[in-house]
Image (tube, rainbow, N blue to C red):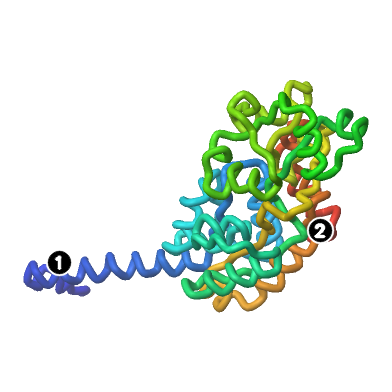
Amino acid sequence: MQISFSHMMPRWMRLIGAAFLALGVTAASATAQAATLTIGGKNFTEQLILSEMTAQYLRSKGYDVELKNGLGSVVMRQGMESRQLDVVWEYTGTSLIVYNKVTEKLDPQQTYERVKALDAKIGLVWLDPAALNNTYAFAMPGKIAREEGIETVSQLVAKFHANPKMQFAFDMEFVGRSDGLGPMEQLYDFHLERSNIKQMDPGLVYTALRNEQIDAGLVYTSDGRNKGFDLKVLTDDKGFFPAYAATPVVRKEVLDANPKLADELNALSAKINDDNMRDMNAQVDIDHRAVSRVASDFLKQEGLVQ
């Protein structure tokens, strides 16, 4: 006869046993979750593509992957610091200026080395940066820029001095930021009056440029609409805008637990550059292709997945 002793135990002992059982289940769940790589991504097209691409790529390598994208920059950073995210694509300039509050002017390599050293202190490892620099730039309607031979910001400023009624479009933040329009005016020796400035949603800047409703506007260098709308992205010849090199960032304990992960992510990073990312962004934003399909096609074209 099988005898159960549970009814013979005092109630407090049964409660403690149940508590330990619950803890055991929780611990088992945590272990299972730790084996899953959680990939984070921000809430704009390029980040949606990068995070989806990374998820597909790592699944093909045999990892169990969970994707959490559509996040704001600060929320994504908090997710890494609180260990809720394991892998993200971050931009060197964002980490330097927004997260680490560094205002010193640094070249692209110095920027990368600085954020790599600073973030290592909190257990975040910067791997190899892609040849993708999604920084700010001034752009003009392509047809007008070609007709007038304008290729640099200095040439644009010279045109403004000759025609001080020109119209410039910026997003809502850039005009008032401490690292925005004011210091740029000082570096390039020009000054815009309120009548020269139109503030609008970043997406509307591209449309206004395409329709030649403005003379110049602030854009992102890797945005697909630069190519799709025939915009001329001007060279920042005095180096005002910081580098925003897209780079895989991984928590150190995740790399320690997955010895091949760094090399695998570096192999992916090596395939990404301004040109192919601009094309992928355009496929989503202009051609309205699904992010998952665009990411899948790229991985196959580059021989990263079968």
Quadrant of the rendered structure where residue 155 is?
A: top right
Quarter holding the N terminus is bottom left
**38 and 306: which is toward the camera:** 38
Residue visible at 62% across and 24% down in the picture: 195
Q: In this view, does 272 lie above or below 9?
A: above
Q: Which residue lies furthest to the left in this view?
A: 10
Q: How far apart are marks 1 and 2 (CA)?
A: 53 Å
Q: What element carries label 1?
A: helix
Horizontal side of residue 133 vs 103, given as left or right: right
Residue beneath disc 1: 15
- What is the tally of numbered marks visible in this picture? 2
**73 and 173: which is toward the camera:** 173
Looking at the rendered structure, the kind of residue marked 2 is Gln
Please identify, in this view, whether the residue under mark 1 or under mark 2 is nearer the observer.
2
Where residue 118 sits in the image (x, y, percent)?
Answer: 53, 71
Residue visible at 78% across and 57% down in the picture: 272
Horizontal side of residue 274 vs 198, given as left or right: right
Quarter holding the C terminus is bottom right
Residue visible at 90% across and 32% down in the picture: 148
Residue 263 appears in view = yes
Q: In this view, does 191 lie above or below 198?
A: below
Looking at the rendered structure, the kind of residue marked 1 is Leu
Q: Is residue 268 above or below residue 217?
A: below
Q: Which of marks 1 and 2 is nearer the N terminus?
A: 1
For residue 302, which numbered disc appears in the image?
none
Where residue 109 sits in the image (x, y, percent)?
Answer: 70, 68
Where residue 102 sits in the image (x, y, percent)?
Answer: 53, 62
Residue visible at 52% across and 55% down in the picture: 98
Quadrant of the rendered structure where residue 146 is?
A: top right
For residue 306, which numbered disc appears in the image?
2
**194 and 91: which is toward the camera:** 194
